[in-house]
Image (cartoon, grey):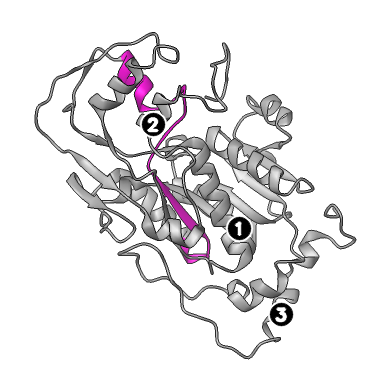
Amino acid sequence: MLARGSSMPCEARCSPGNLVLAERLSSRSRPRVKTCGADVRRRRRRPLHRSSVVMAAVSESCCRDLLVVGPGVLGSLVCQRWLKTFPAATVIGQTNTDASHERLVALGISPRLKADAGESRRFPFVVFSAPPSGSDDYTAEVEAALKLWDGTGGFVFTSSTAVYAGKDGEDCDETTAQFQIGESPRADKLLNAEAAVLGAGGCVVRLSGLYHSQRGAHMYFLKTPTLASRPDALVNLVHYEDAAAACVRALSAQLEGSSEGGEIFLATDGVPVTREKMVEACLACPDAYDDGAMPEFSVSDGPLGKSMTNPQTREKLGWEPVYPSFVEFVAAGAKDSFYPPKKKNTWS
């Protein structure tokens, strides 16, 4: 299959042979792996084709085709942003069932079933955005996606800030200690998957709580009479659209050579909000949230949560959230691409 606008197949233009040739153009030694995260276990040396010398030589000729494994809300937004930037690219959304295929086609995304995916075709850009809940062996699913990456372009795995160990309201950023394997079953799933990605030279984007106008923790709080939580417990958030932008920036950074791969980024708006204030903000915006009430918080003590910031990610990726905080978003009318709500939305 020929890449659009090119007489040479994508696989040929981004082949290991071309990458080795590019490596020979420079006698400079390859730099060591650098990451934006802390307590990352030592990884094996990345393959030859992930060096900055190689990426600088081939980025202009490498095709922009993208595979997104798990094109739900976040994955679909990544696809749309990629198509807007690279309209000639082929963007494929890989799913477990065909339930969302009609929706994907309407967005310009080519759907395919996981069962139909072989290893014969590999992609220069891959995003894995499927949640752990959909798999019995999450690391194996991520490793299968890595086999679909040709090692050029970029690979992004969407993880979670749940891997950070803070719980008493302390400040937390890219350098904060994470759970050790065995301390948290939830974190173990993510950390093992992260290790596979980092070892292959891909990047990880750890996301705080995702939301849009019609989906997120606030919708649950508004509909739940009693919450087994303290009202001042912190929630760290990032809008779905901003999270998608961070993922695309992480891909682009690998293409451009500003990231050599093997890095951990953190996507959060940096303005944690309490559960009580989240609900108060929604109730003060009846045009968007006219059905709900302040829940009863049945716990007065317990963990406060973390206070997330991400200065290194913002500097490295040149990323800033369009929606600076949840409270500001709601105060402005909770207007985004998901508002007003549709009667039927099979993917939100």
* Residue visible at 42% across and 30% down in the picture: 329
Residue 209 at x, y percent in the picture: 37, 37
Left or right? Give the position of 103 relative to 87. left
* 3D distance between C-alphas at marks 3 and 1: 20 Å
Q: Is residue 273 above or below residue 30?
A: above
- Residue 86 magenta-drawn? no
* Residue visible at 67% across and 82% down in the picture: 23
- Residue at the far right: name it: 7
The residue under label 3 is: 22
Instruction: Give the SS element for disc 2.
Output: helix
Mark 2 or mark 3: name the one nearer the start of the chain.
Answer: 3
Kindly indicate whether the residue at mark 3 contacts the one at mark 2 (C-beta within 8 angstroms). no
Q: Which residues are magenta?
A: 198-223
Kindly indicate whether the residue at mark 2 contacts the one at mark 1 (C-beta within 8 angstroms). no
Q: Amino acid at mark 1?
A: Ser
Callout 3 crowding tier (Cα within 10 Å): few <14, some 14–19, many ≥20? some
Q: Amino acid at mark 2?
A: Glu
Instruction: Give the SS element for disc 1.
Output: helix
Front residue of 309 and 255: 309
Residue 328 tag number: 2
Callout 2 crowding tier (Cα within 10 Å): few <14, some 14–19, many ≥20? few
Instruction: Give the SS element for disc 3.
Output: helix
Residue 327 at x, y percent in the picture: 35, 30
